[in-house]
Image (cartoon, rainbow, N blue to C red):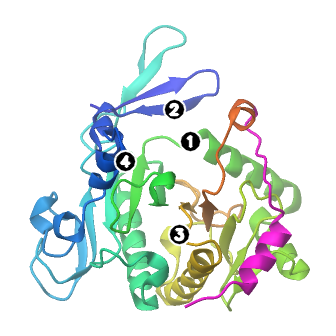
Amino acid sequence: MSLLRQDVTTNDWVIFAPERARRPHEWKQAAEESEASLPSEGKCPFCQGNEQMTSPEIYALRGGTAPNTPGWRVRVIPNKFPALRIEEETRRQEEGPTFRHMGGCGAHEVIVESPDHDLFLAQQPVEQVEFLLRALQLRFNDLMRDSRFQTIVIFKNHGEQAGTSLRHPHCQLIAMPVVPQLLRLKHHVATDFFDQTGSCLYCVLLHEELLARERVVAENDHYAAISPYASHVPFEIWILPKRHNSSFGRVEASLFRPLAELLKTVLQKLFCGLDNPAFNLILNTAPRGDEGKQYFLWHIQILPRLTTQAGFEMGSGMSINTTLPEDAAEYLRQAESF
């Protein structure tokens, strides 16, 4: 059973999910077992034709075929080893002045990006990337109808170093009854900037980046990809909309194609320029109640896993980045696409 406990020294919540210790890559003892944890196409539960190997699908974008059968383009299923469960309670319980916990209430879903086992997102047709983005928004909006959920984190782990346990390309989302402190901090800083200036911090930041041009990796009429001025990791990239919108749940349908095009371009540049690095992709969006406010701008953050955090980073919360973002952006601008 999952559980959330509050760290009173930071006011943040920690998810305890003992069942996830049974995930395949947690059992590996040697290189051979590591290979076994990444099943081949014929044994992969995410592959088309293996639908019976997963829990019944929550949603699928398909061409008229029956649920839980082949013929889908994007498929959403419950995570077999969920961090949080929808059946749990959100009532907080006190165990003295410093111990507070609640049930592990939430939702944890897997979004299988396509039927292709060996095609990474960077290699997919733009149409397929658009299908994925539409499915992510549909699941985001559906889960936000549950008033217990305060925020939803959508993310993708690419490569074992980034935390993936199955090779077949997929994204995940976790809906939570709390807003993590890191997100609270981002929203607080953005809110304070808006209160002082009347402007969205992220819109101003993007405007300045487009004027400077030094850290722009790629752009189109609706979105821009930048290597942020204070990037935390080498080759970090943000994709931001050029028109203000606080919530990914409110992105207009017509804007998914240009987003898919730019996302594919950026992922291709990383794939070709850095030899298919492991990375984490996170979608940042406003929490419940702030979807229509002006202080925040939803955006995609891509964090290549080219370095490892050590004691200083973990002890201080600060980052040491060995690559200037201007150099990273210049290198990626020159990187080939396919």
Where is residue 2? Give x, y as percent: 32, 33
Q: Is residue 32 left or right of residue 338?
A: left
Tell me the amino acid under the disc marked 4: Ala
Tell me the amino acid under the disc marked 2: Trp
Contact, mark 1 vs mark 4 (Cβ under 8 Å): no
Q: Secondary structure at mark 2?
A: strand
Could you give the CA–CA distance between mark 1 and mark 3, rounded to whole angstroms?
18 Å
Tell me the amino acid under the disc marked 3: Phe
Where is residue 55? Give x, y as percent: 15, 57
Q: Which residues are magenta?
A: 316-338
Q: Is residue 260 visible?
A: yes
- Observer-nearest of 289 and 141: 141
Give the mark nearer the N terminus: 2 vs 1: 2
The residue that mark 3 highlights is 248
The residue that mark 2 highlights is 13
Is 336 in the magenta? Answer: yes
Q: Where, quadrant-wise, is the C terminus in this rendering?
A: bottom right
